[in-house]
Image: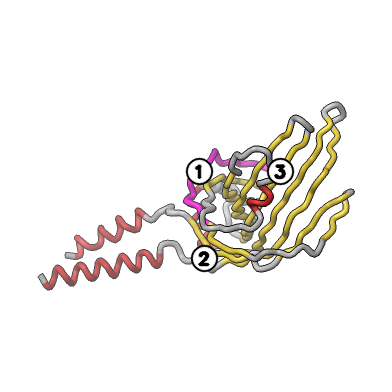
Amino acid sequence: MKSLVLPAILLASTGLAHAGIATTFNVDSGKHWSVKDDVLSYDTQIFTPFGGTLRSNLTSQRDCRNRYVGTAHSSTCFFDFDQSGIKSPFDNGYLARFESAEPPDQVLYANIQVALDGSYTGHFIFAVEKNEYNWNDSTSLFYSASYQLLFKGTGMDWATSIDAALAETLWHRESLSEVTFGTVWSRVRNDWSTGAETWLEWEGWESDLKVAAVPEPATAALFGIGLAAIAGLRRRKRN
């Protein structure tokens, strides 16, 4: 009878591999900043708290990249970002400033940077981004909202490259060293004859991000599968 139960558990656990990553979050407060004449300043605009769920199926959006800068090896993958669980009070207002109705890009940047001694830093950045160029007045528009989860550690092989499997492992394994939320909006006029740029608008929000504890991968699901298998075994014995 055990030979019938155990394969079912193993098959179920295999099906959960690379099922994706998710965590709930809250942003309770923040500061509005702007830059004018190269001077950064903060004002008294009121921040609107919000929350939701950061989620990715770890589906690749384009090829991963590897770079070698000095003695550091940097590896980045670009995954899907499911924004359906987020009700941001900022995206709609900023995106309304664009002329086109094209939706923004939604991407999860998963990155590790490894030194020769095995120490490493990394991040998961869930980002909403949009670029637009207005040929009528030669201005570039840019908006980004990013949820940044940073981590660091030691003992990683220098040649390690990130992929979906490693991203999921790091997500569940690493302790976060810094967690932030921020937005950036800019409108820049380009002078093609001289190459000069004039920053007409440059502002955004910066905030701390509170995330729920990330659960161990598949632990709760496997526990439930195990109970179901045991219940099935008991039913068979009774029959």
Residue under label 1:
60
Determine whether the residue tagged by mark 3 lies in a helix, strand or loop: strand
Magenta extent: 55-68
Determine whether the residue tagged by mark 1 lies in a helix, strand or loop: strand
The percent coordinates of residue 96 (x first, y second) are: 67, 46
Q: Residue at x 86, y 34 (%)?
A: 196
Instruction: Left or right? Give the position of 11 relative to 101.
Output: left
- Residue 175 in view here: no
78 to 120, vertically: above or below = above
Q: Quadrant of the N terminus?
A: bottom left
Residue under label 2:
214
Residue under label 3:
142
Residues at marks 1 and 3, CA–CA distance in whole angstroms: 24 Å
Q: Amino acid at mark 3?
A: Phe
Q: Quadrant of the C terminus?
A: bottom left
Q: How is the image coloured?
A: secondary structure
